Amino acid sequence: MDPEAVRRSLEPTALSKEVVGPASASLRYDAFALTGVRIDAAEHGRLLCSFVVTPRIASPAGYLLSGVTATLADQLGSGVFLSSGIGTSGVSLELNLSYVDVASIGEEIEVEGKLLRAGKSVGVVSVDFRKKMTGKLIAQARHTKYLAVSSKL
């Protein structure tokens, strides 16, 4: 496991001020969602991160956007594969999310990704989103990825 590789894979590729401005095809939504996410722990097959819900990633009603949650599940799920020593973060086959509660602006969210299985070509991780103060589950994701090395044809 290379913790530095995990950290680099989750670093935003654009500054938040660049993403908030006028839309541009070169700006990535991933950077918008990942700005402010902290890696609290990275160990073999497990990644623990946290972030605070800000107005930038909240709906007009003041709740964490479901699209941000989905993007974080995708990105942090990929980070779990890297933390497991797998040489690739893979290609998504399926991403399933269940939203069971909301998170409001100002709440700190803890995200835990765990490796469930990594075979020769397919791997599965779970990603849980919880309110850090209460431990209450707000969303749960299961991320399935194709992990085999690309063909050399």
Image: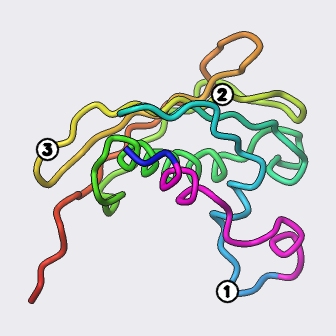
Residue type marked 3: Gly
- The percent position of residue 105, horizontal first and vertical second, equals 88, 35
- The percent position of residue 93, horizontal first and vertical second, equals 29, 57
Between the C-alphas of marks 2 and 3, the distance is 27 Å
Q: Image check: 104 left or right of 100?
A: right
Which residue lies at the image location 63% right of the left edge and 39% below the top edge? 39
Q: How is the image coloured?
A: rainbow
> Which disc, if any, is residue 119?
3
Residue type marked 2: Glu
Q: Few, some or many C-alpha atoms within 10 Å of disc 3 (few <14, some 14-19, many ≥20)?
A: few
Q: Quadrant of the C terminus?
A: bottom left
Q: Circle 3 — which element? A: loop
From the viewer's perspective, is residue 83 above or below residue 102? below
Question: Where does label 1 land, which residue?
Answer: 26
From the viewer's perspective, is residue 107 above or below residue 22? above
Which residue lies at the image location 65% right of the left edge and 14% below the top edge? 136
Sequence-wise first label, 2 or 3? 2
- The percent position of residue 27, horizontal first and vertical second, equals 70, 79
From the viewer's perspective, is residue 49 above or below residue 10? above
Which residue lies at the image location 88% right of the left edge and 41% below the top edge? 61
Q: Few, some or many C-alpha atoms within 10 Å of disc 1 (few <14, some 14-19, many ≥20)?
A: few
Question: Where does label 2 land, which residue?
Answer: 110
Sequence-wise first label, 1 or 2? 1
- Secondary structure that dominates the magenta span: helix
